Image (cartoon, grey):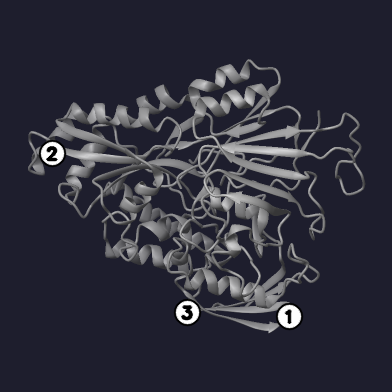
Amino acid sequence: MKKVYMLKVKIFFSLFFVTFLIGCAGISDESVDNENGTSSNTEEQTLKVAFDQGIDSLNPYGDANGEPSTILASRQIYDTLVVNEEEEIKPSLAESWEQPDSKTWTFNIKEGVTFHDGSSLTAEDVKYSIEQQVDSDDSPLTVLWSDFDSVEVKDDYTIEIKTKKPMGTLLSSLTLLFITPADSATDEFYKEPIGSGPFKVSSFVPEQELKLTDNEEYWDGSPKLKKLEFENIPETSSRLTALETGEIDLTWTIPADQITGLENNDDIDIINNPSYLYYFNWFNSSREPFDNPKVRQALRYAVDTEGIVEDLFGETGEVLNSPIPDAVFGSTDLDLYEYNPEKAKELLDEAGYPNGFSTTMMWSNDGGPQILQLAEAMMSDWSDIGVEVEPIQIERAEWIEKLNALDWDMDLQTNSVITGDADYTLGRLYTSEADRNGYKNEELDNLLNSAKETTDQDEREELYDKANKIIWDEAVGMFPLELNQITAMHSYVKGFEPSPSDDPNFKDVSVEK
C-alpha cells in the first residue's frame, strides 16, 4: 500500500530544490476586507521572500526554466492555460478544451485578459509561447514536447494543437507553459518582462533580488499584497535568524535540527506537508566502474539508508521506495535495498573489484537541506566496503555545466517532479535519447514513450510501475529519501497555501498584524 498524503496527485501531471522566506512591512492595524477580499489598509502590504537559491532568469523558455526558482517567479508574473490545483487540472487562461480526436486538442481562451502593459492577450500570444518552448535549444523542458506537431490559431481566442502521437501528458506539460506577448521574447525583454499574472516586475537583479508590484487589473481579482519581494539568502542559519527576528516571514523545507527551536517560538506556525522533492545520487553508467550494474547495486546495499534518514532528517524526510516520490502520479511501491555490507562486498568481488575502488561524488553547495551531512554519511558507509569517495562540492553554475556534460562519477542532488506527473522526471531524464546519466535501455525507452503517448491513466500507471522497477533493480541511482515540506511562518501571514512543487501562487496571501 502507498502512504496516504494530504496532497495526493491522481491524474496526469508530469531541481534541485529551493527554500523561501516571506516578510511583511508597513501594515496598519485597521484592516478591513472589501468585496474583493483585498485589504483596505492605508499603508502598503509588502511581503518579502528569502531563499537559498537566487533567481537567475525570468525567461520561461530558457536554460533555467526547469529551475524551481525560475518557475516560482514565473508563477507570479505569467499565466498558464491550465493549472494543477486540488488534485486535478483546472482552467486558467483556457476556459475550456476538447479533443476532437486522439491527436488534436482545441483550447478556448478567456477573453478580456490583458498583459501588464494593457495590451490584450490573444491566441497569437499563446501560439507564440508554445512555439518558443518547443523550438528552444536551451530549455530542459523542451523534451516534454517531443510529440508536438503544430499549433494553429483558429480565431482570436481559439487555438488547435496537433501532436504526432497521442500525448497523454499534454495538460500536465501545459501547467509549465507560461504565456508571454508574441514577438517580444528577447534578452532585453526578460530583464523586466511583461506577463498577465497577478504581479508585475518592478526590478530584477539576477541571483540577488526580484521586486514585484501588484497587478490591480488582474483578470482573476487583484492581489491582496501591494509588493512582493524575493531576495537570495543562501545560508540557512541567516535565513532562520531573519525569520525569527521578523525581517522575513516564512520559509519551508527546514532542516530537522532547526525545527524544535522554531516550535518554541509562539509567533511562528509550523506546517508539515508532502512534497514532490526528493534526493537522489546518480551513478554515471557511461563510466567505469559504474557501467557494471553489480557495482551500482553494491553501493546501494552498502548504505544504511533507513538509519541515515532517521538520524539526519527525522520528521522532515521519509525513506523513498521508488525513483520518484510517493505523492507523484506514477510512483511505485518497491522493495527497499536492505543494509547489507557483506552482500555489497560480494557484488564488488563478482564485478572484479574485490578491494574496492576510488571515485568521486559531486554536488552543488546549495543542493538541498543537509546535503553535506547526507554525503558524508553515504561516503562513510562506502568506505566500509573499500570504496573511497572524493567529495566535490562546487558552485551551482559549474555543477549544472558538469552535470549536463556527464563530467562526473556520481552526482548527489535534490529534484522536484514539478508537474506531479512521472513523465516530468522519468520521461525527461531516463531515456537513452536524453542521456542524462549514461544509462541506456531500449525496454525502458519503450515503456516511457508508451506512457507518454497513452491518455488511459490506468495504463500509464502500469507502464510506470514497470519502468520504475527497471530503474530501481538496475540501480541507475540511489534514491534515499523524499523530503516533506516543513513550512514555518509568522502567524500574521494569512492565506498562504503550500505547494508540493514549491511554486506557490502568492495572489491570495496577506499580512494581518
In the picture, the quarter occupied by the C terminus is: top right
Give the CA separation, mark 1 to mark 2. Answer: 64 Å
For marks 2 and 3, the one nearer the N-term is 3
Badge 1: how crowded within 10 Å, few (<14), some, or many (20+)?
some
Q: Is residue 195 visible?
A: yes
Give the CA separation, mark 3 to mark 1. Answer: 25 Å
Which residue lies under the disc numbered 2?
A: 348
Q: Is residue 495 visible?
A: no
370 relative to 205 in the view: left or right: left
Nearer the observer, 16 or 191: 191
Nearer the observer, 479 or 179: 179
Q: Which mark is residue 164?
A: 3
At numbered mark 3, what does the secondary structure look like: helix, strand or loop? loop
Q: Amino acid at mark 2?
A: Leu
Residue sitting at 23 percent across and 46 percent down? 409
Which residue lies under the disc numbered 1?
A: 156
For marks 1 and 2, the one nearer the N-term is 1
Measured as percent of width and height from the top left, residue 66 is found at 49, 55
Quarter location, residue 358:
top left
